Image: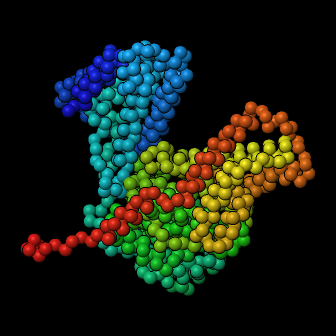
Amino acid sequence: MPLWIILVLVGAALSVLGFAGLGAITLWVGAYVVLSGLVLTIISIRTRHGRAAQTVPSPSTTTWQRRAARLGWVSLSLTALALGLLGGAIWLLATARPPIVPDSPDPVLDVVMAALPVDLDLGAPRPGVLLGIGFALAALIVTFAALQTANALRVLSSRRQVTEPLPGSTSNVGRRVLGAAAMRRLELDVPPAWPASALPAIPPTVVRCTVLLPAHDEAAIIGASIDSLLSQTRPADRILVVADNCTDATVEIALARGVEVFETVGNTQAKAGGLNQALARLLPGAAVEDVYLIMDADSTITPDFLEVALGLLEADPELMAVGGLFSGEDGSGVLGQLQRNEFTRYQRVIGRREGHLFVLTGTASVFRGYALATVAQVRESLIPGHQGGVYDTLAMTEDNEITLALKSLGAAMTSPPQCRVTTEVMPTWRDLRKQRLRWQRGALENVGVYGFTRTTATYWAQQLGLAYGAIALHSYLALMAIGILSVNGLRWSPFWVAIGVVFLAERVVTAWGAGWRGRAVAVVIFFELYYSVFLQWAFVTALAHIVTRRGKGWNDVPRPALAAVGFAAPVVAALGTQWNPISAETMQSSWVEALALFVGVNTLIFATLSVFQMLPPIVKTFHDRRARRAGSHPPAVPDERTVA
């Protein structure tokens, strides 16, 4: 049945119910639905008669990458406006005086209340409601186009559905809702030329692996990295050390172990530039079965890493990349253990997500060669960057950027638990600050360049979650400090002590895989709390650098650790010396009460999340049980007569 007939029938039914006493709002909604159905009727008739005379518009000159970013932000803005207006209208309805449900013994009203919870006798709809509905329709149309754009980008997926631009009826509705000028501005009905699939006609059943080991003055550790490659249960077909402006014995150590060395020429773009030079020589002559393990020279992999990763690529032609799960090397005291606990928690999260990764780690990941070649070819048209370069040399975190690039192109990827990597940990707080500032700023800049798309929505949510977590934790610390500095003490409550026990248990449970040292550090909750504050300061500092457009060098950045110590010093002094620089009346002020309410709500939210982190993952548990049931009931052996 056509959509316009359904709308007319539903609208007519709602209008009749409105006349019967269900309220004016029901009547107005029914009339609006009938009108929508009649508009669609006129549009469909005009489209049917005028389709033969329509001329095909010329393709847009806007790239798919810019189109995806633009439509994503527009759809998000329209959705926010619609939700704001409709939410405001609902708030006005809820706080209306007199109440929207009259207090009357009318028997007709009793029948109405039996069918609906309230009787909305409001007369004409408020302008905010109409605007909200209009923005919601506009957001729906733009979101449809944004999803179509995301589908067009998926040239590395066989599940990409090749669809035409906005269907004729939808395009006409869009012109009436958005306006012809907005349709032309957004180019909703005139997209760029549809990109062709980048998948090979016949996927390979056996792969050939080349290892790229970028190194810059890694003489102290590169020997161990090469040894871990030479001891693989399934050895690589070729090992190539990419020596980038090395001034130590890196090249000599590599040659002594019998591997090849490629020395970069005039590279000033760090690791990404060196890899681009090597891949520019390898990819043009690569076959469809060629895959590449790109691994940091300061890392080592488990002996079965390549066997597992290459086996997965051979078994699943849809899989474009396999990433490793990294853990920290031993040493560096409590700071090193805090980093190892962090890496252990990340491994646990990926395991609960059944291998669905966030980042193809630069420590060790395997890529299909034609996937990397596609990335280099479609930069500037489908994804950001300069055409011809596999890695974006402007990105501070090249592993995060290449992950976004491949995911935008529809590439499937995984991180199996068997593919383990051991990498270095930062030995000092200063080194850790530099590393995390680079990671945080790189992640923020990458999602900013890609915009708000189907692929980056999860990453934007992560960044918002980090910001919310920083606000929540520092609000909690501020409230505790105010309490100590004003009344020189805290009130102990069994309920909030139990909440604290939940947080402590979550820290220990999630770090359980790090061994007894990791559990011992997690039990001392102050270590974990200090480490969290340190990482949040790195996030805030990176965000401030982006906003102020500061250069990408951090040698002169104040250490977050010192800032945290400076914040804690007066609190410790107040506890030790009975010093109360804040008056006790401050605790009774309205803004402190609001802060306490905010902290209380946040604490309950994070406590709930902590409980879920300790419970078995719901989706993974369901899949495991289904797999066990399938394994306990093997398929019946067919009858020979039936086969014959």
Picture coordinates of residue 476, whole percent (x, y): 71, 46
Q: Would residue 215 be visible to someone looking at this image?
A: no
Query: In the rendered view, how is the structure colored?
Result: rainbow
Q: Quadrant of the C terminus?
A: bottom left
Which residue corresponds to the image point at 47% horizontal and 29% vertical from the top-left? 82
Residue 415 image point, x, y percent? 46, 65
Q: Is residue 287 left or right of residue 1?
A: right
Q: How many marks?
A: 0
Q: Name the foreground residue: 87 vs 73.
A: 87
| Place of residue 187 in the rendered image (x, y in percent of width and height, measured from the top left) | 37, 34
- The one nearer the camera, 149 or 301, is 301
Q: Is residue 181 above or below residue 507?
A: above
Left or right placement of residue 18 versus residue 101 in this view? left
Q: Is residue 440 visible?
A: yes
For the residue pair 408 and 192, the one nearer the viewer reads as 408
Q: Residue at x 25, y 24 (%)?
A: 9
Image vertical order of residue 143 relative to residue 49, above or below: below
Q: Which residue is depicted at the point 40% across and 60% down? A: 622
Q: Is residue 642 left or right of residue 581?
A: left
Is 355 drawn above or below residue 582 in the view shown? Answer: below
Residue 530, image x and y in percent? 72, 57
Residue found 45% across the figure and 14% down from its top:
104
The one of 25 and 184 positioned closer to us in this rendering: 25
* Residue 188 quadrant: top left
Give the answer, above or below, for where 487 lies relative to 334.
above
